[in-house]
Image (tube, rainbow, N blue to C red):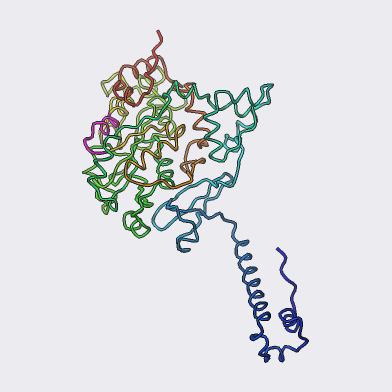
């Protein structure tokens, strides 16, 4: 930006009134300056230019893209500037994070920017994608639905060799069916009839590694209760629970707690628990166990992630390394627990038993709740968000904001984003990774068949 050259006092006077050759003192004393209509217009125009230049300098000094922090559909000019505080976290992808007062982070896509598909690949794998003789039309066939989602999220896919890494839609539907699965939609009216609009909340829940963090961010960016405001958001939140227009990043009894903990465990006391419609995320149990092997959080069991995990049935390696503890459990499977050791806190006979117990608690709950599949938030994001938001009586924020980068900025695992999640969980290629035949047979026998049927997950295939 080029600023005007510095002018003398007299030159400014001539600029404002070029038809008069007067000194500055004469000019200031002249009644013609304010009395003459044309001179007055030039005076106003001049100061308008000055204000515009100052405004542009202020804008140029801040390299930020302002986006609504609370998913409320309001532009920054309609919101108090004190509430527009940029997060210190910045990255090279199409993500801008905003932190509002006591509301946590909301991550939205910069819809004006376009990024290539390879921007979201792990760095160590980018060099492995070689050009092939296939045309882009050949590679697109069967991937149209995936490409449509990525295009809507601002991700450009124009390289056939990169596109080949994406799953075909048939592979996705073979695993999860053609449509999203949502359990509990029959209870939407009951929840809305019982809880007045101004008192309603949606809260996220789910087992460890079920996608709760990502969905919580997306929910806060794409759904809102019109009767909520920033003052309410601050009152109904704390250091553990963020609240954006009635959208809680976790339920007041903690998102990783089972359903029976609703009334005996509290992390946010200002929100009545029956005013919250829980949105519970569930994952394919086999892929879920793969993630638990990388980071188990509060769940512990004897395992070596590199050698044998998921290890439902101990093999020779497990027996050699963990033989003493396995011998004391008096069970044939590898036991899991929470707490300092297996004798402190709850325990289950295996990871599969734990998955069963966790989701049985919410499926069997008698109060309104929604259960959605993590995979549907990847492959049917808009439809799932619409069903969830409208079930609670909320309204959608448009346009839809995609969470395309890591759901957890400081995650311990390898790079994870929307693209890599689609690649990893859109096919059955890694579903049985590191599992022995005994593990697969055990999971086939122990997994709750009713849960698998309800959520339309494929039962583990047992080969003789």
Q: How many marks?
A: 0
At x 51%, y 37%, the residue is 417
Q: Write down the region rendered in magenta.
A: 357-368
Residue 229 locus on image (x, y percent) = 36, 57
Position of 199 relative to 254 (above/below): below
Residue 420 locus on image (x, y percent) = 52, 33
At x 65%, y 68%, the residue is 53
Q: Residue 151 or 35: which is nearer the viewer?
A: 35
Position of 276 relative to 118 (above/below): below
> Magenta stretch containing residue 359, yes or no?
yes
Residue 315 locus on image (x, y percent) = 39, 17
Q: In the figure, residue 448 lies in which quadrant?
A: top left
Residue at the limit of the structure toward the top, as seen here: 464
Position of 261 relative to 329 (above/below): below
At x 36%, y 39%, the residue is 388
Q: Is residue 454 left or right of residue 366?
A: right
Q: Residue 83 or 340: which is nearer the viewer?
A: 83
Q: Is residue 227 left or right of residue 415?
A: left
């Amino acid at each position: 930006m080029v600023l005007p050259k510095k002018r003398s006092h007299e030159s400014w006077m001539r600029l404002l009134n070029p038809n008069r050759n007067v000194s500055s003192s004469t000019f200031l004393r002249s009644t013609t300056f304010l009395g003459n209509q044309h001179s007055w217009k030039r005076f106003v125009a001049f100061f308008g230019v000055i204000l515009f230049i100052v405004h542009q300098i202020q804008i140029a000094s801040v390299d930020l893209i302002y986006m609504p922090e609370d998913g409320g559909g309001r532009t920054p000019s309609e919101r108090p500037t004190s509430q527009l505080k940029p997060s210190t976290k910045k990255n090279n992808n199409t993500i801008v994070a905003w932190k509002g007062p006591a509301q946590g982070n909301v991550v939205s896509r910069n819809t004006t920017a376009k990024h290539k598909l390879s921007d979201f690949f792990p760095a160590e794998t980018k060099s492995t994608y070689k050009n092939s003789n296939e045309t882009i039309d050949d590679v697109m066939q069967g991937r149209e639905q995936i490409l449509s989602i990525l295009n809507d999220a601002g991700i450009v896919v124009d390289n056939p060799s990169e596109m080949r890494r994406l799953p075909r839609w048939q592979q996705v539907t073979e695993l999860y069916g053609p449509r999203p699965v949502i359990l509990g939609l029959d209870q939407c009216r009951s929840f809305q009839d019982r809880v007045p609009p101004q008192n309603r909340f949606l809260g996220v829940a789910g087992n460890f590694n079920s996608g709760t963090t990502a969905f919580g961010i997306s929910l806060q960016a794409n759904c809102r209760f019109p009767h909520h405001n920033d003052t309410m958001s601050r009152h109904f939140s704390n250091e553990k629970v963020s609240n954006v227009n009635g959208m809680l990043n976790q339920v007041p009894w903690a998102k990783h707690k089972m359903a029976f903990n609703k009334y005996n465990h509290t992390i946010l006391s200002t929100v009545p628990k029956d005013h919250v419609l829980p949105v519970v995320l569930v994952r394919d149990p086999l892929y879920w166990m793969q993630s638990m092997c990388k980071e188990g959080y509060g769940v512990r069991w004897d395992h070596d992630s590199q050698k044998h995990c998921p290890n439902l049935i101990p093999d020779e390696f497990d027996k050699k390394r963990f033989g003493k503890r396995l011998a004391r459990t008096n069970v044939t499977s590898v036991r899991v627990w929470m707490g300092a050791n297996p004798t402190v806190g709850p325990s289950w006979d295996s990871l599969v038993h734990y998955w069963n117990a966790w989701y049985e608690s919410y499926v069997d709950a008698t109060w309104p709740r929604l259960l959605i599949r993590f995979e549907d938030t990847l492959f049917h994001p808009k439809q799932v968000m619409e069903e969830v938001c409208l079930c609670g009586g909320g309204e959608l924020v448009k346009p839809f904001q995609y969470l395309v980068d890591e759901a957890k900025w400081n995650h311990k695992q390898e790079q994870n984003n929307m693209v890599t999640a689609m690649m990893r969980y859109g096919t059955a290629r890694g579903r049985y990774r590191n599992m022995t035949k005994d593990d697969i047979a055990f999971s086939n026998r122990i997994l709750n068949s009713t849960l698998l049927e309800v959520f339309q997950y494929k039962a583990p295939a047992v080969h003789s």
